[in-house]
Amino acid sequence: MKVNEIMSKDVITVPVEMSVHDLAELFVKKNISGAPVVDKEGKLLGIVQEEGVIFQDKKVHLPTFINISLGFLTLGIKRFEEEMKKITANKVGEIMVKEPLTMSPNILIEDAATIMIENKQYYFPVLDNEILVGIMTKKDIVKAIAKI
């Protein structure tokens, strides 16, 4: 069995300028956990998931450093700055994952499951010749296993 046989084909996409609040409402209304972010021509720009919305309520912890090297300090500050950008984000483009991993519709489900587990990622846009044709999630694989 291949990805194109079990992927979700009715893809709900969002624009980069959508507000994070509207995105949260869309996720609840449509009972989805993520969405591809596309431009006006439909080109994939990234993905947004519930984690990005949840990040808005994350507590801010200032980095604490004891007896550290300059390299570690730089890494800590960079991570802190990235978290602050997500926490204060207003638009989808500010919380989206740019250049997400994607899948081909022609790979085997076993290979898709392996990719998910090895990358610890469970939401994949499915592209056929650079065109978004579906979404592959862990839920799709679980449904396929249940049907066997």
Image (cartoon, rainbow, N blue to C red):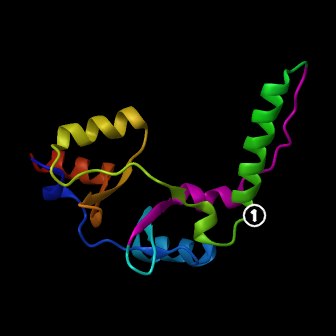
Q: Is 72 a magenta residue?
A: no
> Tag count in the figure?
1
Q: Is 49 a magenta residue?
A: yes
Would you name the residue on which mark 1 appears? Answer: 88
Q: Is residue 141 left or right of residue 92?
A: left
Q: Position of residue 107 (x, y in %)?
A: 17, 45
Q: Is residue 148 left or right of residue 8?
A: left
* Residue sitting at x 50%, y 59%: 49
* Residue sitting at x 27%, y 59%: 127
Q: In front here: 59 or 73? A: 73
Q: Is residue 70 left or right of residue 100?
A: right
111, above or below 28, in the image: above
**Secondary structure at numbered mark 1:** loop
Q: Position of residue 106 (x, y in %)?
A: 15, 51
138, above or below 6, in the image: above
* Residue reaching furthest to the bottom: 40
Q: Is residue 112 left or right of residue 68?
A: left
Q: What amino acid type is highlighted by mark number 1? A: Thr
Neighbourhood count class around disc 1 (C-alpha, 10 Å): few under 14, some 14–19, many 20 upward: few
Q: Position of residue 132 (x, y in %)?
A: 30, 66
Q: What is the quadrant of residue 4 in the picture?
A: bottom left
* Residue reaching furthest to the right: 67
Part of the protein shown in magenta = 43-66
* Residue sitting at x 26%, y 73%: 10
